[in-house]
Image (cartoon, grey):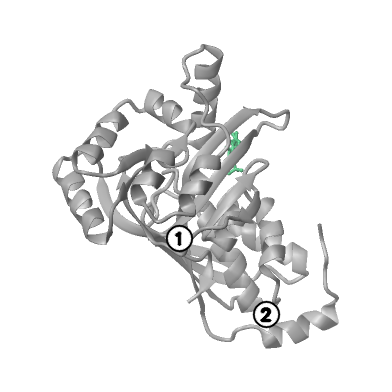
């Protein structure tokens, strides 16, 4: 949907935009439940998922410029393409097209979220670009409008505009908040060496299912949604599930060792995050999460392990 403003409005809105830098912090996501349905005609799978935003963040700074440029530091610097294929650039151009503003900004990304890790880092950065450029240009779109633009960038991007804990349907782009107690859950994020391409994980699940080698699908998230209305991490632990886990384990058998090590370290549950290869573990509290992270690092079963909590807000000016 396009809704361009006229050139007269544009000058006015530019004046109302930020003159100094706009800094946006955006979380990563895990899927507490990821039910994957059949492959659709458009190449996507129908999903029934529960997204959860956690406190492992990227930061995007936007400044006024005469062209569109992107620089970066941190996770994946030197590996990640900064050209038109980058989701940050795609999101900025999509916002410019929607608002009728010129796509001018100097963007700088500080990445902590690993690339191709199943934590939606690229999608998070795209959500951050929408929020940052909306503030920089003074275009003042609502979260719902930003989420509509986000859906055209990638399936996970609308959720990262909102954050929190939310149900995702369609290909994941239809997001609605879930009723949950105001409880903070404590997680350990075990970062693997190297990434796993999302289409490859979905393709592997299709292959396993066709061969009769996939576990029973996790189905609808009723038990998980019920667990979120309680406070007991043991109840939540029993309700976590991810259909893509079997595919990630088939492509990366070593992840089984990571999952085993987390449970041996006392985690209430462990599962592959999204399409992997990052694994996440549920802890009883913050101190428990720190201890599990230390043990995972000592056991040498991952590149890094960090404690995090959720739910947290989506992309926000900080
Ligand atoms: O939407 P996004 O561009 O992030 O998706 C990347 C790829 O992941 C898709 O091209 C598709 O192969 C796979 N995917 C899928 N079903 C979904 C979401 C993603 O098969 N619901």
Where residue 78 appears, as percent x and y from the top left, is 39, 52
**Label 2: how many residues lie within 10 Å, few (<14), some (14-19) or many (20+)?**
some
Vertical placement of residue 12 versus 59, above or below: below
Q: Earlier in the sequence, mark 1 or mark 2?
A: 2
- For the residues labelled 1 and 2, the Cα–Cα distance comes to 28 Å
* Image location of residue 151, percent across then percent down: 67, 52
Is residue 198 among what the camera can see?
yes
Q: Secondary structure at mark 1?
A: loop
Q: Which residue appears farthest toward the top when viewing the image? A: 211
Of residues 125 and 240, the one drawn nearer to the viewer in this rendering: 240
Answer yes or no: do the residues labelled 1 and 2 have beta carbons within 8 Å? no
For mark 1, what is the residue? Answer: 311
Taking 79 as reference, is 135 left or right?
right
Determine if residue 189 is in view: no
**In the picture shown, does residue 186 fall above or below 235?**
below
Disc 2 target residue: 138
The numbered disc on residue 78 is none
Question: Residue at left 49%, top 54%?
Answer: 229
Give the residue furthest to the left. 298
Between marks 1 and 2 in the image, the one whose residue lies nearer the viewer: 1
Q: In screen coordinates, is 221 left or right of 17?
A: left
Whether ligand 1 has any atom under 8 Å from the Cβ at mark 1 is answered as no
The reply to whether the residue tagged 2 has its Cβ within 8 angstroms of ligand 1 is no
Q: Position of residue 91 (x, y in %)?
A: 63, 58
């Amino acid at each position: 949907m396009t809704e361009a403003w006229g050139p007269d409005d544009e000058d006015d809105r530019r004046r109302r935009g930020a003159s100094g830098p706009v800094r946006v912090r955006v979380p990563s996501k895990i899927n507490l439940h990821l039910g994957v349905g059949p492959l659709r005609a458009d190449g996507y799978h129908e999903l029934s998922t529960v997204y959860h935003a956690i406190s492992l963040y990227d930061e995007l700074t936007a400044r006024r410029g005469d062209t569109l440029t992107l620089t970066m530091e941190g996770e994946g610097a030197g590996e990640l393409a900064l050209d038109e294929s980058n989701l940050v650039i795609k999101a900025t151009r999509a916002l410019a097209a929607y608002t009728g503003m010129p796509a001018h900004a100097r963007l700088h990304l500080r990445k902590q979220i690993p690339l191709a890790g199943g934590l939606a880092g690229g999608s998070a950065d795209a959500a951050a670009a929408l929020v940052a450029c909306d503030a920089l240009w003074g275009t003042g779109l609502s979260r719902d409008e930003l989420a509509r633009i986000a859906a055209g960038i990638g399936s996970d991007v609308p959720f990262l505009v909102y954050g929190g804990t939310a149900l995702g349907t369609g290909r994941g782009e239809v997001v609605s908040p879930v009723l949950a107690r105001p409880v903070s859950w404590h997680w350990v994020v075990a970062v693997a060496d190297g990434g796993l391409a999302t289409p490859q994980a979905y393709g592997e699940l299709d292959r396993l299912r066709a061969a009769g080698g996939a576990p029973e699908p996790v189905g609808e998230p009723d038990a998980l949604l019920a667990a979120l209305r309680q406070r007991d991490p043991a109840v939540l632990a029993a309700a976590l599930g991810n259909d893509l886990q079997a595919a990630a384990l088939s492509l990366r058998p070593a992840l089984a060792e990571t999952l085993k090590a987390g449970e041996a370290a006392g985690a209430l549950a462990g599962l592959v995050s999204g399409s992997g290869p990052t694994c996440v573990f549920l802890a009883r509290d913050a101190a428990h999460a720190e201890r599990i992270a230390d043990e995972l690092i000592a056991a040498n079963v991952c590149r890094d392990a960090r404690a995090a909590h959720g739910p947290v807000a989506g992309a926000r000016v900080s």
